[in-house]
Amino acid sequence: MLYVTHDHGEAMAMGDMLGVLVEGRLEDYGPPQRVYDSPASLRAARAFGDPPMNLLSDGNRVLGIRPEHVRIAAEAELGGRVERCESVGADAYLRVQTPRGVVTARVPSTRAYPPGERVMLELPPEHLVAFDAVTGRRVDG
């Protein structure tokens, strides 16, 4: 059976296999968790997930990481200033402007992060996905 939805959570929960269509083009197809964790293309990474995967320029590559994998740390390589903090119940989405682009982190809503506050962001390497900056395709290995 083919089931079409724009609801990312519903697609993850219902599908044995998942396809991501962007402007009528099949950008990715596979098991839902693989598509979510390691999208086949930048277009699929931007289109699938709410909020979508963070994408940071890194020379000839673009590095992707999901908001739930970004951590606030006392010390880290990437720092930035809080643009806004949006509470969604037990969690909050923290939008941080960094020198490499805007990063969204899912954090507990128990702490306030006022606009302008400087934070350090840890991007665990085991959760990074690399894409070729020219072709937009995922780079394996």
Image (cartoon, rainbow, N blue to C red):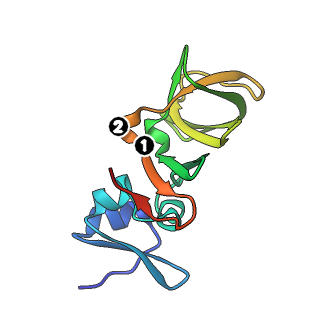
Residue under the point 57% across and 24% down:
77
For the residue pair 119 and 7, the one nearer the viewer reads as 119
Residue under the point 40% across and 64% down:
40
For label 1, the SS is loop
Residue linked to disc 1:
128
Q: In which quarter of the view is residue 15 placed?
A: bottom left
Q: What distance separates the C-alpha of mark 1 from that of mark 2?
A: 6 Å
Q: Is residue 21 above or below residue 10?
A: below
Residue linked to disc 2:
126
Seen as rendered, the residue at the extreme front is 60
Q: Is residue 26 above or below residue 58?
A: below
Q: Is residue 42 above or below residue 71?
A: below
Residue 17 located left or right of residue 36: left
The reply to whether discs 1 and 2 touch (Cβ–Cβ < 8 Å) is yes
Residue 33 located left or right of residue 127: left
Seen as rendered, the residue at the extreme right is 116
Q: Quadrant of the N terminus?
A: bottom left
Rendering coords of residue 98 (x, y %): 69, 35
**Mark 1 closeness class: few <14, some 14–19, many ≥20 residues within 10 Å:** some
Residue under the point 47% across and 45% down:
65
Rendering coords of residue 11 (x, y %): 35, 67
Q: In which quarter of the view is residue 81 placed?
A: top right
